[in-house]
Image (tube, helix red, strand yellow):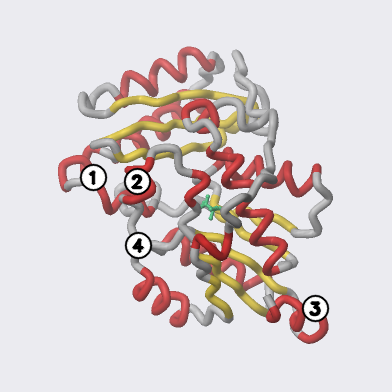
Amino acid sequence: MDWAKERRCCLGRVALVPTMGALHVGHLSLIELARMQADEVVVSLFVNPTQFGEVSDLTSYPKTLEQDKARCEALGVDVLFAPSADRVYAPDASVWIDEEQLSRGLCGGSRPGHFRGVCTIVLKLFNWVQPDLAVFGEKDAQQLRIIERMVRDLNIAVEIVRGEIVRESDGLAMSSRNQRLSKVARADAVVIYEAIELAKKWVEQGERSTEVLMQGVRDRLARVPSLIVDYVVVVDDVTLEPVEQLGSSALLAIAVKLESVRLIDNSVLRLG
Ligand code: PAF
């Protein structure tokens, strides 16, 4: 990317916001965060095939390029980088980035190869754009921690900035996948947020057993019979290993399917 070479001499601090498009208010908040911390903002828009297991999940991923462009323009994004798949991967590509610890459980357990695809594309984007910082949303808690680990372990000179989860007015975490839900499923999906809020309340009231918390969350989710739970876990916020008793900070993470749409959400459970 010639632009990246030029920026090294002439532009100030550059931020990258990697996305797969179908931009929603959650993405826009990441772009605004990038704008606050950098002189130039690059948004990448690429539906990365190597991080999808099921072909149907990839083909049904919403694509709204014209709308995305308009939103980026309105927010003063300097560069929109939307390469085609054949430019991104050589047909005989054979080098991949594998994170071996944090990606074992949670989404990594249910979506084998997913984080290999994510890490590889993120590193490729870093190499192309050469940003000073990159912004990732906290909704994808495991992804965020894996990318932070990749940056640490591979000595990548990019600062990772965390963007808070943005929620709809009823609490559902914003996601491009939400638009694939029917009206009924969309209304049902709020149960995920309700379950998280309940868990936080139980912690405030003194509950420390993660088994009790996880069971309480599963019970709440079971109020929607059509909802299929992939996982409900409370893990150490740094190692993502299961914990039995709440320590200073643990991560409650949930993944479910509603009408075959995969939804994830999480919250850090803090004591006191
Ligand atoms: O979070 C996403 O949208 C994707 O996983 C990312 C980071 C853009 C990589 O394709």
Classify mark 3: residues with Cα within 10 Å, few (<14), some (14-19) or many (20+): few
Task: Measuring from the top left, give residue 174's x and y in whole percent.
Answer: 39, 52
Camera-side residue of 182 and 56: 56
Residue 118, x across and y down, in percent: 58, 47
Q: Can residue 271 be spotted in the picture?
A: no
In-front residue for pair 269/3: 3
Of tags 1 and 3, the one toward the viewer is 3
Q: Is residue 170 left or right of residue 267?
A: left
Front: mark 4 or 2: 4
Residue labelled with disc 4: 63
Q: Which image quadrant for residue 156?
A: bottom right
Nearer to us in this view, 72 or 92: 92
CB under 8 Å between discs 1 and 4: no
Cα gap from disc 2 to disc 3, whole angstroms:
40 Å
Tag nearer the camera, 1 or 2: 1
Q: Type of residue at label 3? A: Arg
The kind of residue on which mark 1 rests is Arg
- Of the two numbered discs 4 and 2 on the same chain, state the one appearing first in sequence: 4
Numbered disc 3: secondary structure: helix
CB within 8 Å, label 1 to label 2: yes
What residue do we see at 69% from left, 36% from top? Answer: 99
Residue at the spot of label 1: 186
